[in-house]
Amino acid sequence: MSAMREQLEGLITEMINRGIRYEDAHQEFEKRFIIEALNKVNGNLGRASELLGIHRNTLSRKVSSYRLRKKP
């Protein structure tokens, strides 16, 4: 098993033990995933959507719903 998979399994176990609900974990993961993608492409929504494999409009909606801002 890869080190990343082991880290993920440990994190999931810890979250479940702390009572974190699936929906909260899912939203936090998605938000951070989007933030990292946007940071990698300097806030370019088109390039970030390609990197994430989602439509630009979908990404734009998610950025709005999570109230994310571009880095200055």
Image: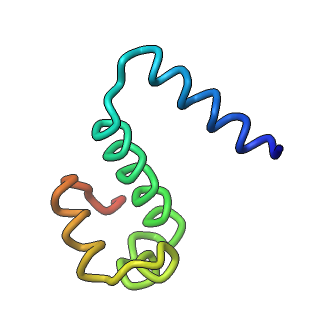
**In this picture, residue 6 sits left or right of residue 1:** left
Establish if 39 lies above or below 27.
Answer: below
Q: Quadrant of residue 34?
A: bottom left
Q: Which of the two residues, 42 or 30, is positioned nearer the viewer here?
A: 30
Q: Which of the two residues, 20 or 48, is positioned nearer the viewer here?
A: 20
Q: How many marks?
A: 0
Q: Residue at x 26, y 55 (%)?
A: 68
Rendering coords of residue 59 (x, y %) = 30, 72
Q: Residue at x 53, y 31 (%)?
A: 12
Quadrant the N terminus occupies? top right
Quadrant the C terminus occupies? bottom left
Rendering coords of residue 56 (x, y %) = 31, 83
Rendering coords of residue 17 (x, y %) = 47, 15
**In this picture, residue 5 sits left or right of residue 1:** left
Establish if 26 lies above or below 20.
Answer: below
Furthest-top residue in this view:
18
> How was the colour assigned to the protein in this rendering?
rainbow
**In this picture, residue 66 sits left or right of residue 46:** left
Q: Residue at x 31, y 62 (%)?
A: 70
Q: Which of the two residues, 71 or 57, is positioned nearer the viewer here?
A: 57
Rendering coords of residue 47 (x, y %) = 46, 82
Q: Residue at x 28, y 40 (%)?
A: 23
